[in-house]
Amino acid sequence: MRRWFSVREGANNDLPQLISKVRGSSQAPTQMTTGRAQGISSATGNGAASSPGHQSKSSISGRIQVQGSSANVTHTINEDERTEFTRHINAVLAGDPDIGNRLPFPTDTFEMFDECRDGLVLAKLINDSVPDTIDERVLNRVGKKIKTLNAFHMTENNNIVINSAKGIGCSVVNIGSGDIKEGREHLILGLIWQIIRRGLLGKIDIKLHPELYRLLEEDETLEQFLRLPPEQILLRWFNYHLKNAKWDKRYCVPSRNVASVLTRV
């Protein structure tokens, strides 16, 4: 993940194949194991209060239907996004002194959402994307003073997560601390994507990657290029590799297919 933004000649020319793999996976209806059995608490040792867990969900064409807040409401989870975001979390938070022992999360279950309930995983992910956003001394963690995280501890952590996510530019109008504590998958997945996206776009800087000059178009000055928003530079980078791979297709706006690929490059 740390080397995701390279535009060296010939580098990352397998991106089109990765896109094809993302699109082509999970085409047949399957039944998926989604983490803890109902009524079983997490075996991760995080000391968090137990929750009902996730029931098995049908996966059709890479999309999983999850129950909403009421019986007649369902939400769709993209299985590829869930898998790749889980891998990203496993990679960037490996060895963390507070939650490293809980990693890696399985990529073929919904366990990640249960592990996010206490707020610690999301807080650590925010600090990975934008370092020092959260003073981790204010987080409730299992230790000498706290033997088990209760609902109050988790709510406090999640309030910090929501406020910090908003502070780095994430949209949090539809998610609250209670949604995280209850493990609402579609809301947590959307927040995770925004946090990862913020971190990725923050690395689009010619000072960090002087090879970006290769993306300049004909008659374009460096000053003009640097005025482009990060999203446009990212798209230009992606299309640069598509062109080098002799693919005719070009992207005009960011897509979730591109997003899933970027987390694994």
Image (cartoon, rainbow, N blue to C red):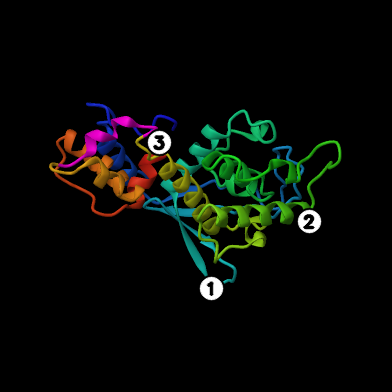
* Rendered position, 30 above or below 66: above
Per the model, the C-alpha gap separating discs 1 and 2 is: 30 Å
The answer to whether residue 224 is left or right of residue 5 is left
Query: Which of these two is toward me, 178 or 224?
Result: 224
Does the CB distance between marks 3 and 1 fall below 8 Å? no
- Residue 107 in picture, x, y percent from top left: 51, 39
Please report whichever mark, 1 or 2, sits nearer to the chain's N-terminal start: 1
> Dot 3, crowdedness within 10 Å: few (<14), some or many (≥20)?
some
Query: Which of these two is toward me, 70 or 265?
Result: 265
Per the model, the C-alpha gap separating discs 3 and 2 is: 36 Å
What are the residue bounds of the magenta stretch?
A: 207-217
Of tags 1 and 2, the one toward the viewer is: 2
Q: Which residue is mark 3?
A: 264
The answer to whether residue 191 is left or right of residue 40 is left
Query: Which of these two is toward me, 36 or 181?
Result: 181
- Residue 180 in picture, x, y percent from top left: 63, 56
| Residue 213 part of the magenta-drawn span | yes
Can you say which quadrant of the picture contains the C terminus? top left
Q: Amino acid at mark 2?
A: Phe
Q: Which mark is residue 121?
A: none
The answer to whether residue 200 is left or right of residue 38 is left
Q: Which mark is residue 152?
A: 2
Q: Which residue is mark 1?
A: 72
Task: Report whether residue 264 is seen.
Answer: yes
Task: Report whether residue 241 is seen.
Answer: no
